[in-house]
Amino acid sequence: MFQVVHRLHGAFERFRDGMKTLGVLDAIQRHPASFLPILCHQPTPLSADIIEELFEVRLSQKGSNNRVQEEVVVPFWRDYLQDIEDEDGPAKLDMILAFATGATCIPPMGFTPQPTIEFLHIERSQSAVVSRFPMANTCINCLKLPLHKTYNEFKSSMNFAFANTYGFGME
């Protein structure tokens, strides 16, 4: 209680006095709806286009075998976002964003670092087992997509992952 109310009381009073000086506080109190968009962030509903533009796709070097596999999956990702928007709407897109970044909406100042898409390849030093499900690192806003040969396999694995990991079991 002390940390929230008493410790910050002086700072809030000075802020309020400053707002009164030019009549801003009175205007806010008389017309709160007019000031709402200026003072309070209103997240816009997510769309497939917004999600697609938000994530930077990081492809492997041109001409590499990895790049060929990735170029098959990128259209799957775009089609998947469009299908989700058409079938389930913004709520499911919120879940996808939360899976990749930990946030259900785009922050007012954007993400730092920018969300990225990478791909799950077999590393030479690792075993030949690669996840068929997407993986995410929310600390660096990175979504790693699995490599599938068909859209139906891709969609199935994405749906399973998003349905079973949202919020680490907490809502």
Image (cartoon, helix red, strand yellow):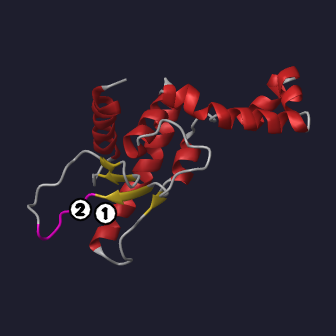
Looking at this rendering, what residue extends furthest in the right direction?
22
Residue 124 is covered by the magenta coloring: yes
Residue labelled with disc 2: 121
Residue occupying the point 52% across, 51% down: 111
Q: Position of residue 159 (x, y in %)?
A: 33, 34
Look at the numbered discs 1 and 2 and tell me whether their residues touch, using CB distance below 8 Å.
yes
Residue labelled with disc 1: 69
Q: What stretch is highlighted in magenta?
A: 120-125
Three-letter code for the amino acid on which mark 1 is drawn: Gln
Three-letter code for the amino acid on which mark 2 is drawn: His
Q: Where is residue 122 in the image (x, y as percent from the top left)?
A: 18, 63
Locate residue 8: give its quadrant.
top right
Q: In which quadrant is the C terminus drawn?
A: top left
Vertical order, 79 against 114 (above or below)? above
Left or right of 127 in this view: 122 = right
Left or right of 14 in this view: 84 = left
Most frequent secondary structure within the magenta stretch: loop
Locate residue 160: give its quadrant.
top left
Say what secondary structure mark 2 lies in. loop
Vertical order, 128 against 150 (above or below)? below
**Viewer-nearest residue: 6 or 95:** 6
